[in-house]
């Protein structure tokens, strides 16, 4: 039988990335102010259904799976910008051409009106 481990292994590089995301979001929330300062009375984390757009910009031509990177990023954003990832009703993930100088990710979160 094939059993899956109940524990999640995060690589050293993954831990470093998650720590840096938490540091930016947790210790310097003002970093994000320009992106939502035009919206009045915004309260984070959002509690409504949301649309999440993710642009991933690789630093080199190595191959990697887009879904693994997106899942990890969503887990890092959860709790800060939205309460739970089950609020995501629309998800767009784009893997852009590599750019060593601009490597990283860009996220856009918007509220979705449900009928």
Image: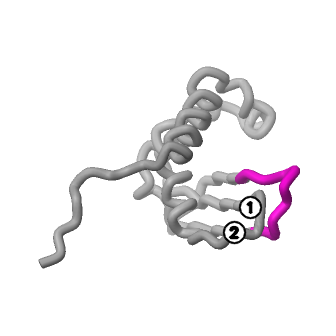
Q: Position of residue 17 (x, y in %)?
A: 58, 42
Q: Is residue 88 left or right of residue 42?
A: left
Q: Is residue 3 left or right of residue 41?
A: left
- Residue 14, above or below 89: above
**Dot 1 crowding, Cα within 10 Å, few <14, some 14–19, many 20+:** many
Q: Position of residue 12 (x, y in %)?
A: 50, 43
Q: CA distance from mark 2 to mark 1?
A: 8 Å
Per the rendering, the mark at residue 104 is none
Residue 1 falls within the magenta-colored stretch: no
Task: Name the residue: 17% across, 75% down.
Answer: 2
Q: Which residue extends farthest left?
A: 1
Task: Name the residue: 72% across, 61% down.
Answer: 55
- Residue 38, above or below 88: above
Q: Element type at marker 2?
A: loop
Q: Which residue extends farthest top?
A: 27
Give whichever of 20, 74 is nearer the camera. 20
Q: Is disc 2 in contact with disc 1, using a CB cutoff of under 8 Å?
A: yes
Q: Position of residue 30 (x, y in %)?
A: 71, 24
**Dot 2 crowding, Cα within 10 Å, few <14, some 14–19, many 20+:** few
Q: Position of residue 87 (x, y in %)?
A: 45, 56
- Dividing the picture into quadrants, the one containing residue 5 is bottom left
Q: Which residues are magenta?
A: 96-105
Residue under circle 2? 62
User: What quarter of the picture does the N terminus occupy?
Assistant: bottom left
Task: Name the residue: 22% across, 66% down.
Answer: 4
Q: Element type at marker 1?
A: loop
Q: Is label 2 or label 1 in front?
A: 2
Residue under circle 1? 58
- Residue 29, above or below 52: above
Q: Is residue 37 left or right of residue 17?
A: right
């Amino acid at each position: 039988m094939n059993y899956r481990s109940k524990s999640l292994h995060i690589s050293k590089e993954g831990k470093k990335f998650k720590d840096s995301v938490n540091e930016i979001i947790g210790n310097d929330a003002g970093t994000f102010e320009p992106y939502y300062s035009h919206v009045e009375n915004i309260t984070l984390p959002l509690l409504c259904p949301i649309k999440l757009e993710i642009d991933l910009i690789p630093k080199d031509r190595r191959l990697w799976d887009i879904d693994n990177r997106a899942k990890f990023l969503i887990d890092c954003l959860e709790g800060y910008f939205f309460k739970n990832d089950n609020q995501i009703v629309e998800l767009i993930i784009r893997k852009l051409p590599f750019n060593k100088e601009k490597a990283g990710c860009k996220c856009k979160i918007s509220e979705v009106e449900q009928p």
